[in-house]
Amino acid sequence: MTIKLFNTMTQKKEEFIPLDEKKVKFYVCGPTVYDYIHLGNARAFVVFDVLRRFLEYRGFEVTYVMNLTDIDDRIIDRSIADKINVEVITSRYIQAFLEDMDQLGVKRATIHPRATENIEEIIALIASLVEKDYAYSVDGNVFFEVSRFEKYGDLSGKKMSELRSGARVSVDEKKRSPLDFALWKSQKPGEPAWQSPWGAGRPGWHIECSAMSMKCLGESFDIHAGGVDLVFPHHENEIAQSECATDSKFARYWLHNGFLKIEGDKMSKSLGNFRTVRDALKQHSAAEIRLFFLQKHYRSPIDLTEAGLKAAASAAARLSGFYSKAKSRLDDGEDVATSEASGSDDVQSALAPFEKLKSELLDALDNDLNTPVAVARLFDMVRDANRLLAKDSLSAQEMDALRFVVTTLEELDAIFGIIDKADQGGSDKLVGNLVELLIDIRNDLRGKKEWAMADKVRDELASRGVVLEDKADSTTWRLR
Ligand code: AMP
Ligand code: ZN
């Protein structure tokens, strides 16, 4: 088994050899927590979750770190616009993020470090860069001097000279060059701030990830991942500041997922063309959304369309439908009794095609996590195994083949998370939709000040184990 991963740094698929033979140190840039995450963010978190699970499947022990950016311009802007304290915003959206990840079947990271809980480490890292003359302070700000790092531009393939001529004349007179970026920002009135050797202020975004990744994983680690929008400047800057501070290689494999797009544009908060994970989960199960992502290679862009989601939904239904039928056929077990004994050749012949498909599937995953091919092989297995299910009775060998397919599905679903096991008749989704309907009706009643009826809806649901929780601008529900 050789796992290959496409390294943005070398622009090649490389054999993946971790620093420590059986352990993988893996860092993924996490969300900036000022709002609900959208499906574009979810794509990044799902595909790297699948890579993590695949590495675990291949026997590696993975330390998976995903930071939570809880201090940033966007958070401060939101706090000012909504007149809500920064911590209230960040704790609300960290909670929402973790709930969304759970709902999407994304495994929790081994560590979810938060920027505001690592200010000491961040300041120490900046201080070492100032000490070594890679960074300079002006009026309470600290900037990284890009021209001091020769390898700047290696990750993004940008040449320093082009960057310089392309850079707008700096509006920030404090910087020596327009390319220099902030490591520490001096406090502006009303902004949250921490004391530092350069005065009160807060860290820049890039240095947060360097400090947290190195704190959790060491100066050098195996994989650093995020969406392709992070290649420049975020990851380029992370490399510059980390390698200058430690004189060691920072991350060894740089992985980037392609965009989720809508009508050709990147899904993003700023363009307003986004769909939150919460919203999508009202209509689609986690399995359907994950399958929708995994049917494309993680580096390719995907267009989000209703038709695409529908196709994923019917494919997921085929998969879970087969799974539940095959399981009950195996549980029945009566076929075994009617089957005639036969030689090992027959065993081979019933199993062999399925084993071949499984090995092709794993080869595809070894090859830069080629999930579209892997998922296609899984559906080939299901198609062939459905032929077995169509028979009135199965031989012992055919039952073994069926058992092999079911076990393989379960084994691989621990990586993909695309089978709705608990939702075999779609009943969970139906329950969710019905509760949402009752919440809408209750809100209409409340709007018309029909309090008694509104309370009746709430109380009747509660007596059936469905608890409604009213928030400032929405009502959520959970099972008691
Ligand atoms: P942010 O909270 O904006 O820093 O994004 C969190 C993660 O989602 C980063 O890895 C981004 O690169 C990734 N991301 C954001 N938008 C998209 C998108 N439309 N498609 C794929 N990945 C995205
Ligand atoms: Zn980052």
Image (cartoon, rainbow, N blue to C red):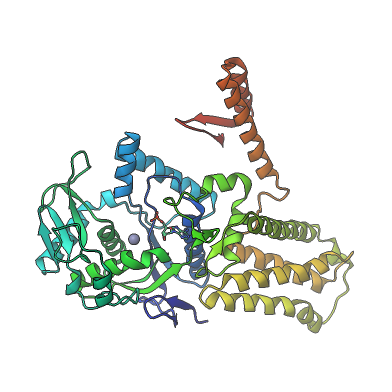
**Quadrant of the image occupied by residue 430:** top right
Q: Nearer the viewer, residue 140 or 193?
A: 140
**Quadrant of the image occupied by residue 24:** bottom left
Picture residue at 46% right of the left edge, 56% below the top: 41
Looking at the rendering, the quadrant in which ligand 2 lies is bottom left
Q: Position of residue 226 (x, y in %)?
A: 41, 64
Whether residue 273 sits left or right of residue 216 in the image: it is right
Total marks drawn?
A: 0
Picture residue at 43% right of the left edge, 50% below the top: 269
Q: Position of residue 407 (x, y in %)?
A: 67, 66
Picture residue at 35% right of the left edge, 35% below the top: 82
Q: Which of 84 and 267 is in front in this view?
A: 267
Q: Position of residue 399 (x, y in %)?
A: 79, 68
In the image, is residue 453 above or below residue 206? above
Whether residue 392 sits left or right of residue 59 in the image: it is right
Q: Nearer the viewer, residue 159 or 465?
A: 159
Quadrant of the drawing holding the C terminus: top right
Whether residue 238 sits left or right of residue 56 in the image: it is left
The answer to whether residue 352 is visible is yes
